[in-house]
Structures are given as C-alpha cells and as structure tokens.
C-alpha cells in the first residue's frame, strides 16, 4: 500500500519530454544488478540489456533498457523504445496503468524525430543529371541514355513496380531512409496511436522496407557485400516479356485450340510448419483451379520434428498437406542467408505473382531482402504482418 501511495503521488505530474527528463520516470531497482552496471556507458548498458532480452528475461531487460535510456538523457532512442516494448509485454505501467500514456508519448516523439532526421523523398524531375545521386540507387547517370531510360533505371533500382506506369510522367517519387526507426514495425502494430499520429505506423514500416535489402547484405564482420548490377529485376522488362508470351499463347489458341497456360503464383514463407498462419491456410491451396493457377511454394523454414507431429499434432502434418495439394513445393533452406541466390531461383521460375507471408515477423527465418530484389512483376503481402509493408516494391496487401 505504501508503494502504491508513492506511485500515486509520483504520477500526479506525469509530464513527459522525451529529449529532456520525464518528471515521472519508471523506477529502476539497483539491487537487481551488479553495481558496475551503472558505471558503464548507455551503449554498453544497452548491449547488456540485449543479452537479457535474447534470453527472454524481459523483467530484467526492461529495467536495463530503461536505465540505458535515462542515462543517455533519452537520446539512445532504441533503448527507450525497447523499454516501452517490454513494459507493454509485461503490462508494467505503474499505479493504475498511468505509465502507459507516457510510454505512448515516447513512441510518438522518438518516431517523429527519426522521420525528420532520416527520411527523405526524391522526385526524379528534381535530380541533377550532372551529379551522382546514388544515395541508395546502384547506378550512375550515363549521358548516352535519354531521360526516360534514366528515369526507368532509377525506378527499377528503387524496386517500384505494378502500382506505377513506368512509361508515363510524372515519375513516382523515390523514398530514402538513412536508417530504420528505433521502433520495430511489429511493435508499432500493437500501439494504439491516435489519428494524428497513425501515419507513424506507415513510416516505421517504410523505414524497415527501405533498409531490408541492405541489411541482408550485411556480413558478420560489419561490411556490406555488393549487390549485383542486374538486381533488382526490372518490373517493366518482366511485364513486357509476359505480355509477349501471352500474345503468342493467344495466337496458338486461335490457330489450333491449345488452352492458355495457367498463371504462375508463388508463396514464400518460413512458416510452412505448425504455425498459426498455416493453421489458417493449409487447406487454402486445394481450392485453386489447376487449369487457371499453377502454385509454387517456397519454404524457407524447417519442417516439424516427426515426434512433435506424432505426439503433439496427433499425426497431423500441415506441411505435408500443402505438399500434397500444390503443384510445386520448393524447400529453399539451402539459400538461407543468401537472398540474392533465392531471388534468382524464384525469378527463373517465371512467376507472374509472388505472395509473401512473413512480413516483418520471424527475424532470422524470413527471406529478408528478397522482395526488394523484385523477382516477380506483381508482389503481394499476405497474412502474418497485418499492416502496410511501407515498401515501394510491394504492390498489394491482402
């Protein structure tokens, strides 16, 4: 009761300045940790917090992240937002939950500041043709190319696809991020921001999309591998190739009655095992008309252990049900950590549509960076991440 009275008094003046000091800070219990912890830098404290976080010791991790946040005077924003995330998981908002509003203020203020610092929009008509505008674009302007060719190349390098007609002006803007936001898109999904701040959810996803392929090329030693010059694939070129194929198929049908080939549709996910997504969808595939649709599944995740299927699932193997009902099931675990090779493998299948199920979930399992390389002309986000991808290389969300 004494503690509750203290919390009640503490929360009476709960004004928050995320880049100063909140008048009502979450309490840190120093007896939990070694005294040397509090003598370290905010960055060192944050790394210790990540150790506890990875061990799923969320109570201690939230305390350490909060101390890192406070010691940095609220400028090590990733520590602040990680502390918020863990308090949300633990429902640890103090007396009567009054700390919740303070935590949402942290999320909003940090994200708005990072949008101002790290996001920029570039319009192709504003590019200086005599300068190297290669911020994230993997090409240089060649004076021998005409303006439209140059603009199409810029759009290709940005991965912009079906939602824009490349051959018409004005050209679509290209969105750049210097780094991703401190709040992860999956964290942001659960935060009930008001209408004035809901656009921040879009920006958080957008920042992750902008850095996703670059992160996939990050080596263990901290260097970044080069991206092949022919990637991402050109949506315009793929569409033209498919249109030409379709014209030939139409002529063949008129000539000798040969039926049109089915549309090739691919599904890529790490969750083709006993996951919630597959629980909802393992029977989906048997309803596709094989004369209209040819289904390819690309599984980046491992199958369930036979003992788990036998004992826990009572002999029901959802992965096998999918294998039995699709045209092609590709176990692509051999491409783990190599999104470039996976993009080439999928592109070689000549699919018209690629549907991705993981979104920004399943870090370490999902095909990070794959969609940004544009292996298919039409790309769709479905199921796991129930919000906008923020990506210019994703055309639709279902």
Image: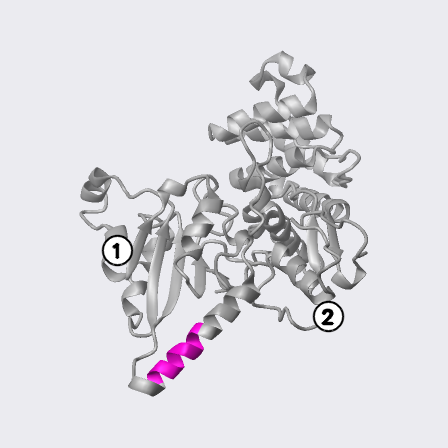
Mark 2 → mark 1, Cα distance in angstroms: 45 Å
175 lies above or below 40:
below
| Residue 252, magenta (yes or no) | yes
Question: Magenta residues: mostly which secondary structure?
Answer: helix
- In the picture, the disc for residue 372 is none
Q: Residue at x 56, y 37 (%)?
A: 86
Q: Nearer the viewer, mark 2 or mark 1?
A: 2
Magenta span: 245-253
Quadrant where the N terminus is found in the figure: top right
Q: Is residue 214 left or right of residue 12?
A: left
Q: How is the image coloured?
A: one colour
Nearer-the-camera pick, 229 or 65: 229
Tag 2: Cα neighbours inside 10 Å, few (<14), some, or many (≥20)? Answer: few
Q: Is residue 86 left or right of residue 280?
A: right
**Residue at numbered disc 2:** 170
Residue 236 shows up from this direction: yes
318 lies above or below 152:
above
* Residue 391 screen position, x and y as percent: 59, 56
Q: Residue at x 59, y 29 (%)?
A: 222
Badge 2 vs badge 1, beta-carbon distance below 8 Å: no
* Residue 258 screen position, x and y as percent: 29, 80
**Residue at numbered disc 1:** 323
396 lies above or below 337:
below
Nearer-the-camera pick, 246 or 9: 246
């Amino acid at each position: 009761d004494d503690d509750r009275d203290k919390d009640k008094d503490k929360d009476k003046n709960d004004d928050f300045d995320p880049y100063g000091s909140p008048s009502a800070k979450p309490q840190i219990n120093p007896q939990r940790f070694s005294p040397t912890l509090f003598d370290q830098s905010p960055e060192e404290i944050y790394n210790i917090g990540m150790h506890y976080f990875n061990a799923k010791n969320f109570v201690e991790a939230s305390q350490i992240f909060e101390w890192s946040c406070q010691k940095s005077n609220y400028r090590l924003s990733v520590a602040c937002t990680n502390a918020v995330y863990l308090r949300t998981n633990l429902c640890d908002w103090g007396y009567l939950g009054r700390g919740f509003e303070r935590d949402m203020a942290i999320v909003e203020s940090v994200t708005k500041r990072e949008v101002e610092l790290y996001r920029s929009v570039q319009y192709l008509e504003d590019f200086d043709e005599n300068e190297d505008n290669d911020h994230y674009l993997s090409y240089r302007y060649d004076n021998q190319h005409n303006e439209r060719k140059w603009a199409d190349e810029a759009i290709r390098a940005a991965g912009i696809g079906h939602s824009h007609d490349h051959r018409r002006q004005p050209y679509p803007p290209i969105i750049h991020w210097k780094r991703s936001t401190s709040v992860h898109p999956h964290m942001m999904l659960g935060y009930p921001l008001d209408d004035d701040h809901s656009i921040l959810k879009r920006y958080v996803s957008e920042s992750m999309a902008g850095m996703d392929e670059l992160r996939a090329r990050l080596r263990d030693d901290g260097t970044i591998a080069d991206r092949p010059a022919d990637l991402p694939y050109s949506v315009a070129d793929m569409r033209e190739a498919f249109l030409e194929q379709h014209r030939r198929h139409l002529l063949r049908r008129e000539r000798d009655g040969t039926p049109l080939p089915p549309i090739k549709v691919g599904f890529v996910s790490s969750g083709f095992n006993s996951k919630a997504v597959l629980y909802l969808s393992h029977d989906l595939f048997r309803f596709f008309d094989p004369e209209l649709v040819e289904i390819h599944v690309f599984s980046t995740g491992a199958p369930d252990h036979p003992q788990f299927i036998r004992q826990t699932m009572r002999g029901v193997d959802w992965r096998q049900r999918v294998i039995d009902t699709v045209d092609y099931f590709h176990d692509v675990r051999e491409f783990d950590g190599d999104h470039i090779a996976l993009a080439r493998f999928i592109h070689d299948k000549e699919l018209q549509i690629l549907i991705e199920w993981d979104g920004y979930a399943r870090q370490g399992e999902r095909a990070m960076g794959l969609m940004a390389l544009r292996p298919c002309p039409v790309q769709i986000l479905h199921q796991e991440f129930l919000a906008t991808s923020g990506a210019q290389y994703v055309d639709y969300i279902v």
